[in-house]
Image (cartoon, rainbow, N blue to C red):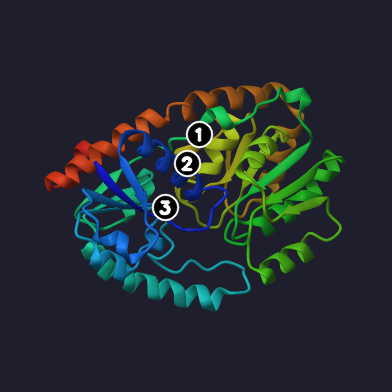
Amino acid sequence: MKILIIAKRAESLTGAGTYEANLVRELSKRHQVKVFESPEDLEGDWDIAHCTDLKHLTFSIARKLRCPLVVDAHDYYWIRYYHFFCLDFPLRFLAQKYRKVKYHFLFKQIDGIILHGKFLYDLYDHPHKYLSFYFGLDYTGIDTKPWPDRENLILFVGGDFFRKGLPRLLRALPQVLGKVPDARLMVIGRDYWYAKALARFLARGLPVEFRYGMPRSEVYRTYSRCKVMVLPSEIEATPIVVAEATMAGATPILSHVGGHPELVQDGKTGFLFPLDNIELLSVRLVQCLTNREMSEQLVRQGREFIGQFTIDRMMTRLEEIYRDVLAGKPCNDAQKEQQ
């Protein structure tokens, strides 16, 4: 097939950026692929166009395409306004209203929408939606180390610090330090200058290191240094960083929101905690930093679960979606749901 990929020009180090990089690489092995660079690309004789993130699709691009369009959706924040502590909440409120209207009209230009996880799938209203839970991670690039060789390092990975619950983790850290004095936190991710400044202020006096830019290969190596990866998000879909950390041998601790329960089974492949239970979050952190047998068992079972999401399965599912869209078949929800 001749496929036009519509993607964000700047590299994203984690999440949708990882999915996008893997997708382009693997599609290029199987098909004739071009990444969109200019309006002239839209005039090409493409079999199908694939936008890797709904947020990056514009009306001008969607309207000019002369082939079927498939789009990935990675979040649900536009469906309604979710309030949480952050400096720019008025802008987030307005952005949510704008996106809701924009997507209402943009959906008419989309021939198939790919939703990563059952939580997202159930929330979206589109006549041609497809469930795909295959991240397609390239596990060969993820380093691992045995538990005794790891540091008492807690890892937080992802931009948008306040949506992802960094203040909640900072409130739990003093209780962790009372039990594990040499514990420390590394925050990897980009954010706006005002968010970074406030996050640093909230972290004052605590052993926290901020890394605002890091190549993906270095992020993968850093996973192998830590014992636990925490994502105490206010709202979240199915973040790829959870799968990456698990495969690297770090125990995941997640807030019980959104698609997190699809990635972690509480007490079996990691831990989930109620959003406002800081005490339980600190207890779980201490357990993961000090209990080797428990941590190794959680990681082993987590790898067995996450390991099924391979490149080959992702590509098989994606090509099935392409064929359905090209054939103009109605999407059968019962047939498309995956376990």
Classify the position of the C terminus by image quarter.
Answer: top left
Q: Which mark is residue 273?
A: none
Q: Which mark is residue 74?
A: 3
Q: In what element is the residue under mark 3?
A: loop
Which is nearer the eye, 112 or 28?
28
Left/right placement of residue 302 relative to residue 42 reads right
Instruction: Assess disc 1: are there few (<14), some (14-19) or many (≥20) residues with their C-alpha within 10 Å of its C-alpha.
Output: some
The residue singled out by tag 2 in the image is 261
Left/right placement of residue 186 relative to residue 17 reads right
Say what amino acid the circle numbered 2 marks.
Answer: Pro
Quarter of the view holding residue 202: bottom right
Q: Are marks 2 and 3 in contact (CB under 8 Å)?
A: no
Residue 201 percent location from the top left of the image:
78, 66
Residue 275 percent location from the top left of the image:
58, 53
The residue singled out by tag 1 in the image is 265
Say what amino acid the circle numbered 3 marks.
Answer: His
Quarter of the view holding residue 38: bottom left
Which is nearer the eye, 226 or 334?
226
Q: Are marks 1 and 2 in contact (CB under 8 Å)?
A: yes
- Could you tell which of marks 2 and 3 lies nearer the N-terminus? 3
Q: In what element is the residue under mark 1?
A: loop
